[in-house]
């Protein structure tokens, strides 16, 4: 602006032939080049100054207008807070040779003071209440499609995700636990779960863990020998499985003498009743809640401790006979707490897609952490994960397309399988 004022004053004096002071302070004239282009040069400088001034005004106006939008969208205070966080400190103050230990924990502090799975679930339910917790897709129909190589693929028509809130899950967990006790299960008595990853799997497991019933996990892909070995070694009397796996159980029932009850997760589009082994009590999973509502009020579970066995997790049997690993409540909570340090930004705005086997500790720990932090858990399957997965009917959306998860755990084999989708 000062340059603009100088140019205007200079033009006025030039046009009126006003005497200008000499550079040394004496009277005189400044030598002005008398060339035709000199006035144009001055005018071009004036136009440039005006243009630059307008640009500065526009930039300033843009800053003022967009600053609130920047604060709302970018949340710079989160960056400033994280920038000044101390992630580690010296284990022995003043000793430079001492190791450094991690100090940062999740801001939600959801696992603080938690020692057992029962405490973890109850704390999350109290915190998140009516927020969506577990999501599942109802099966609307199924068909079989024969491939050119002779293989037959089962194609499913699935609905949109339906959600169960934390409070609703709490009620279901309580009723299922009472229903199991009404069927004769008691604390510290093993219950086997042999099923695919689904909402009923987690509800049944949480019900058992709440009343101190150890859960024996078997992969749904195990062979007959592996299933026999796992049930016999743990001397389980109650088995929770799925409708689709019932024929396999019927074939080997004579080799599992301890088994007395089978609870099966229903298939809503099944065209025939489940294959029922003789001599056993067969109970639909939905009936557990009904039994829990009418169960004797004297039936009470046992509050678990951190040292009580929560899971007896059997391996996949790829290297021989499946081996059972005893995992305590404290082990699971500690694993979830370790995950929370890595996933420090996970919260109730996130969605987790659950499709790996819950019989694997990675999937189990990831779901427990998501539950504790308030993230929605949407159940899926490797066969229906994407729009092009082999188990999805043409025109039906895959699980990931509908859920749009922000969190997903995987293993190399699964990534290779789905990399093209």
Image (cartoon, rainbow, N blue to C red):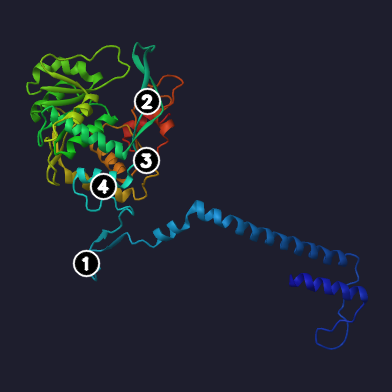
- Neighbour tally class for label 4: few under 14, some 14-19, many 20 plus, Cα within 10 Å: some
Q: Position of residue 64 (x, y in %)?
A: 61, 59
User: Looking at the picture, does residue 259 appear above or below residue 337?
Assistant: above
Q: Please state if 316 lies on the left or on the right of 411 as rendered.
A: left
Q: Please state if 68 lies on the left or on the right of 135 as rendered.
A: right
| Residue at the image position 50 percent from the left and 51 percent from the top | 73
Q: Is label 4 in a helix, a strand or a loop?
A: helix
- Neighbour tally class for label 1: few under 14, some 14-19, many 20 plus, Cα within 10 Å: few
The answer to whether residue 221 shows anywhere in this view is no
- Reading the image, the residue beneath label 4 is 123
Q: Is label 2 in a helix, a strand or a loop?
A: loop
* Mark earlier in primary sequence (4, 3): 4
The answer to whether residue 111 shows anywhere in this view is yes
* Mark earlier in primary sequence (1, 2): 1
User: Looking at the picture, does residue 241 appear above or below residue 313?
Assistant: above
* Mark toward the viewer: 1 or 2: 2
* Mark toward the viewer: 3 or 1: 3
Q: Please state if 10 lies on the left or on the right of 151 as rendered.
A: right
- Reading the image, the residue beneath label 3 is 407
- Reading the image, the residue beneath label 1 is 92
Residue 384 is marked as 2
Q: Position of residue 286 (x, y in %)?
A: 24, 25
User: Looking at the picture, does residue 239 appear above or below residue 70?
Assistant: above
Q: Is label 1 in a helix, a strand or a loop?
A: loop
Q: Please state if 34 lies on the left or on the right of 186 as rendered.
A: right
- Neighbour tally class for label 2: few under 14, some 14-19, many 20 plus, Cα within 10 Å: many
* Mark earlier in primary sequence (4, 1): 1
| Residue at the image position 18 percent from the left and 45 percent from the top | 116
Q: CA distance from mark 4 to mark 1?
A: 34 Å
């Amino acid at each position: 602006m000062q340059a603009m004022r100088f140019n205007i004053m200079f033009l006025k004096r030039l046009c009126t032939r006003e005497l200008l002071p000499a550079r040394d302070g004496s009277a005189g004239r400044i030598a002005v080049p008398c060339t035709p282009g000199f006035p144009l040069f001055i005018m071009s400088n004036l136009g440039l100054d005006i243009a630059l001034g307008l640009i500065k005004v526009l930039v300033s106006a843009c800053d003022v207008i967009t600053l609130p939008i920047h604060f709302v969208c970018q949340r710079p205070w989160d960056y400033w807070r994280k920038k000044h966080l101390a992630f580690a400190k010296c284990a022995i103050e003043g000793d430079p040779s001492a190791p450094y230990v991690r100090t940062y924990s999740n801001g939600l502090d959801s696992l603080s003071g938690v020692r057992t799975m029962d405490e973890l679930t109850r704390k999350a339910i109290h915190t998140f209440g009516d927020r969506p917790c577990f999501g599942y897709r109802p099966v609307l129909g199924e068909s079989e499609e024969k491939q050119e190589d002779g293989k037959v693929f089962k194609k499913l028509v699935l609905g949109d995700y339906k959600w169960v809130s934390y409070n609703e899950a709490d009620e279901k967990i309580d009723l299922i636990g009472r229903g199991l006790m009404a069927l004769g299960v008691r604390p510290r008595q093993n219950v086997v779960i042999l099923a695919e990853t689904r909402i009923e799997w987690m509800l049944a497991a949480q019900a058992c863990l709440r009343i101190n019933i150890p859960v024996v996990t078997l992969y749904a892909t195990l062979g007959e020998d592996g299933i026999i070995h796992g049930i016999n070694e743990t001397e389980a009397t109650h088995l929770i499985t799925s409708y689709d796996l019932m024929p396999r159980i019927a074939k080997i029932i004579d080799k599992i003498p301890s088994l007395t009850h089978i609870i099966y997760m229903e298939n809503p589009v099944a065209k025939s009743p489940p294959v029922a082994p003789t001599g056993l009590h067969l109970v639909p999973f939905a009936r557990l809640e009904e039994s829990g509502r009418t169960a004797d009020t004297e039936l009470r579970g046992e509050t678990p401790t951190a040292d009580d066995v929560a899971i007896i997790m059997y391996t996949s049997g790829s290297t021989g006979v499946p081996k059972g690993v005893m995992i305590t409540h404290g082990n699971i909570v500690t694993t979830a707490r370790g995950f929370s340090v890595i996933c420090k930004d996970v919260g109730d705005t996130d969605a987790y897609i659950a499709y790996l086997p819950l019989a694997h500790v990675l999937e189990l720990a990831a779901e427990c952490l998501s539950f504790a932090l308030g993230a929605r858990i949407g159940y899926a399957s490797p066969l229906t994960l994407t729009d092009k997965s082999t188990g999805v009917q043409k025109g039906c959306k895959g699980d990931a397309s509908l859920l749009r998860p922000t969190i997903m755990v995987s293993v190399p084999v699964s990534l290779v399988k789905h990399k093209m989708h």
